[in-house]
Image: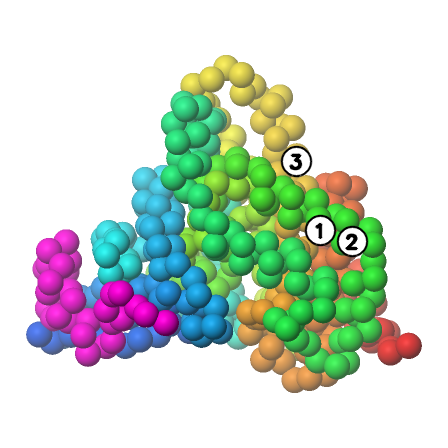
């Protein structure tokens, strides 16, 4: 594969920073320590720190999917989508993302604050740490992005122009395939432990489920409600503790950003909380941690709803009444439950799994995965009947009790 731009290395990063006037003065490159820490699926990530403790983070998109290699080409122009997502969030919720320093479109490099001392939330959840308040921050983030980039706040012609600018077809195609299509068929990207095969077979033979997944995919592909992060999960949130012991959070990695359904971002968070809860159950993690974890999805939803209602008073168009908002929020909550199920199923069966499940011992892994699959599939099929996050939590409780008592399905 011919690559027409320089791929950075830890050794070349200082010279790159020196060559970029927008980055001048942020760090002292003569004393810079650089580490490549990109453990994600797509990109290179360089964290840099100088002798005085100043830092910067650079993220460079590769012309292929890093997880797979050059056999899966992917446009490096996706860095523009991420820049667009960061810029929108910087305007709406600057306190909930790293400080954004700009994008180099020729070299496909984003520059942002180095969140020194912060850690990926998924890993901390795996270890049973409680970061109170972070779930609510995600609700605030989603609400502000949804409001400030939609027809609720902007002239309709401006929104139409932004929809065109934000088209992100290759990244959307990844979601369309990996989340909504491949888990429900035989595909080379899928993998799971043999003991989980009866659960997967039951899922794939459920025609009602597959029809409802199709409905969720259709909404993902056609509902251009607002600019969304489109890959918001516990691995794209950095956390730390405040002095009072509560949690703080920053959202990262919006490279999948496009105009899509608002419920997708909320659902992505819910689906990842589901994996964390399944892990906690099979490991019998401390009751305090499990009780807190049981409430994080509700906390996210409550913060989202409260922030949307707060922002609603600013709307310039009288078409959007309070009654409209009530109906819209009710639909978003149902969408979030359904999308949460789709995101959770993908993480068990498809490509790019999650450490919540994968780091468990095989017997526990099968149990946790079964809890996720059964809960998620019910969410998808029954989202209209469930209607609320509280009801979706009840599904988890019932499924987890069944699996822990009776085990997983046996092979026929």
Q: Return the disc, 3 or 1, that comes first in the chain's sequence.
A: 1
Element carrying mark 3: helix
Evaluate if marks 2 and 3 touch, with contact meaning CB atoms under 8 Å apart. no
Q: Quadrant of residue 47?
A: bottom left
Of 376 and 406, nearer the camera is 376
Circle number at residue 209: 2
Of 8 and 58, nearer the camera is 8
Q: CA distance from mark 2 to mark 1?
A: 6 Å
Q: CA distance from mark 3 to mark 1?
A: 16 Å
Element carrying mark 2: helix
Check disc 1 and report the residue beneath it. Answer: 213
Callout 2 crowding tier (Cα within 10 Å): few <14, some 14–19, many ≥20: some
Magenta highlight: main SS: loop
Evaluate if marks 2 and 1 touch, with contact meaning CB atoms under 8 Å apart. yes
Which quadrant of the rendered structure holds the C terminus? bottom right
Q: Residue furthest front?
A: 2
Q: Position of residue 368 (x, y in %)?
A: 70, 72
Callout 3 crowding tier (Cα within 10 Å): few <14, some 14–19, many ≥20: some
Using residue 126 as the reference point, say whether residue 166 is left or right of it. Answer: left
46 inside magenta stretch:
no
Boundaries of the magenta span: 1-29
Evaluate if marks 3 and 1 touch, with contact meaning CB atoms under 8 Å apart. no
Query: Residue at point 68% right, 76% down?
Result: 192
């Amino acid at each position: 594969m011919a690559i027409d731009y320089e791929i950075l290395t830890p050794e070349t990063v200082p010279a790159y920073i020196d060559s970029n006037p927008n980055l001048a003065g942020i760090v002292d490159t003569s004393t810079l320590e650089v580490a490549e820490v990109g453990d994600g699926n797509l990109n290179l990530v360089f964290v840099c720190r100088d002798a005085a403790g100043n830092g910067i983070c650079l993220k460079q998109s590769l012309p292929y999917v890093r997880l797979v290699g050059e056999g899966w080409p992917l446009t490096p122009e996706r860095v523009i989508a991420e820049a667009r997502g960061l810029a929108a969030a910087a305007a709406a919720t600057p306190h909930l993302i790293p400080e954004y320093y700009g994008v180099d479109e020729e070299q496909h490099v984003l520059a942002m604050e180095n969140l020194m001392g912060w850690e990926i939330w998924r890993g901390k959840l795996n270890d049973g740490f409680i970061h109170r308040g972070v779930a609510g921050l995600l609700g605030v983030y989603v609400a502000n992005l949804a409001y400030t980039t939609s027809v609720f706040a902007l002239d309709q012609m401006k929104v139409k122009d932004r929809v065109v600018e934000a088209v992100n077809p290759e990244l959307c195609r990844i979601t369309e395939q990996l989340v909504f299509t491949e888990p429900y068929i035989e595909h080379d990207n899928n993998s799971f432990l043999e003991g989980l095969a009866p659960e997967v077979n039951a899922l794939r033979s459920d025609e009602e489920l597959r029809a409802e997944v199709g409905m969720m995919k259709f909404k993902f592909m056609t509902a251009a409600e607002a600019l969304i992060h489109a890959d918001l999960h516990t691995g794209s949130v950095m956390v730390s503790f405040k002095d009072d012991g509560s949690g703080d959070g920053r959202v990262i990695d919006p490279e999948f950003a496009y105009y899509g359904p608002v419920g997708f971002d909320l659902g992505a968070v819910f689906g990842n909380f589901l994996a964390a809860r399944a892990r906690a159950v099979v490991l019998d993690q401390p009751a305090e941690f499990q009780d807190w974890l049981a409430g994080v999805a509700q906390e996210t939803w409550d913060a989202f709803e409260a922030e949307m209602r707060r922002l609603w008073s600013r709307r310039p168009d009288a078409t959007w009444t309070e009654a409209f908002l009530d109906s819209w929020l009710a639909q978003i909550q149902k969408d979030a439950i359904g999308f949460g199920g789709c995101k959770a199923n993908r993480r068990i069966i498809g490509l790019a799994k999650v450490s919540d499940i994968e780091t468990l011992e095989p017997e526990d892994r099968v149990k946790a995965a079964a809890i996720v699959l059964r809960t998620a599939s019910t969410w998808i099929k029954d989202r209209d009947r469930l209607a609320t996050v509280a009801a979706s939590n009840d599904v988890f409780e019932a499924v987890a009790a069944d699996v822990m008592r009776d085990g997983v399905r046996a092979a026929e």
